[in-house]
Image (cartoon, grey):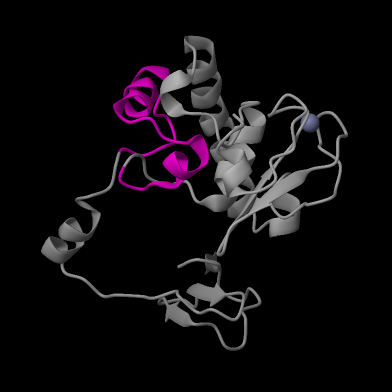
Amino acid sequence: MSAGRLRFLRAGEKAPKAPAFRLVFEGGAQLVLTEAGAKKRAGVWLLGPEAAEEQVAHLGPEALGLGAERLGEILARDSRRLHPLLRDQRALAGIGRAWSNEILHRARLSPFALSTQLGADEVARLAAAIDEELSRGLELRERGASNERTYRVHGRLGQPCYVCGTTLARVDYEEHTVLYCPRCQTGGRTLKDRRLSRLLR
Ligand SMILES: [Zn+2]
């Protein structure tokens, strides 16, 4: 899925009328998939154990609890921009566009910094930010929190940074947006677009 959301609803909890997918358990609990936006990409497959194994074979290690040492190894493998690298499920699994924004903001790192140019302290900061943000997100989502309550950077263009109050900025791509704080993350620089951002780290 891209803008999809999978939720577990207890018996009797209010469910959306026309979800993309609904699995009802004995006793009335439900697993419900909804998808926002005009582009529908979410899908559900029923797989046997072997096919399921095949589906996840290409995934990198789970991002939550990865630790600085293993993260350092992943970052050192190729020279890549941090935002797309964090979202690459083959490198590490579990981080999408929104959490890439949240994590890099927490780590005070530019989304366009190169993975091979981070110092040891920055790698440690990024590893800590992954754990802090994913734990925070899981806890909120398990309580059914909305996007609005969960994200502090993602989707908040033009709003003040929750750390320093600077107006959050973005770089637009065709299908996603990179949100960041020009003061906390890029040394005061605003990244205009892909071409310019290549020059700025
Ligand atoms: Zn800030």
Front residue of 122/67: it is 122
Q: Residue at x 49, y 18 (%)?
A: 118
Q: For the point 66% across and 77% down, which residue is it?
A: 14
Whether residue 145 is visible here, answered yes or no, is yes
Q: In the figure, is residue 41 to the left or right of 183?
A: left
Residue 69 is inside the magenta segment: yes
Q: Quadrant of residue 23?
A: bottom left
Q: Is residue 180 magenta?
A: no
In the image, is residue 66 above or below residue 155? Answer: above
Give the x, y percent position of residue 168: 79, 43
Which residue is at a point 72% across and 55% down the rendered structure image?
Answer: 155
Q: Is residue 18 above or below residue 7?
A: below
* Ligand 1 located in image quadrant: top right
Residue at point 44%, 27% (across, down): 115
Please tell me which residue lies in front, 119 or 10. 119
As rendered, which of 29 and 185 lies closer to the eye? 185
Query: Which percent across, then down, holds residue 153?
Result: 72, 45
Where residue 60 appears, x then y in whole percent? 29, 41
Outermost residue to the bottom: 18
The region drawn magenta spans 61-90
Q: Residue 62, relative to residue 189: is it above or below?
A: below
**Residue most toward the top?**
120
Q: Quadrant of the C terminus?
A: top right
96 relative to 91 in the view: left or right: right
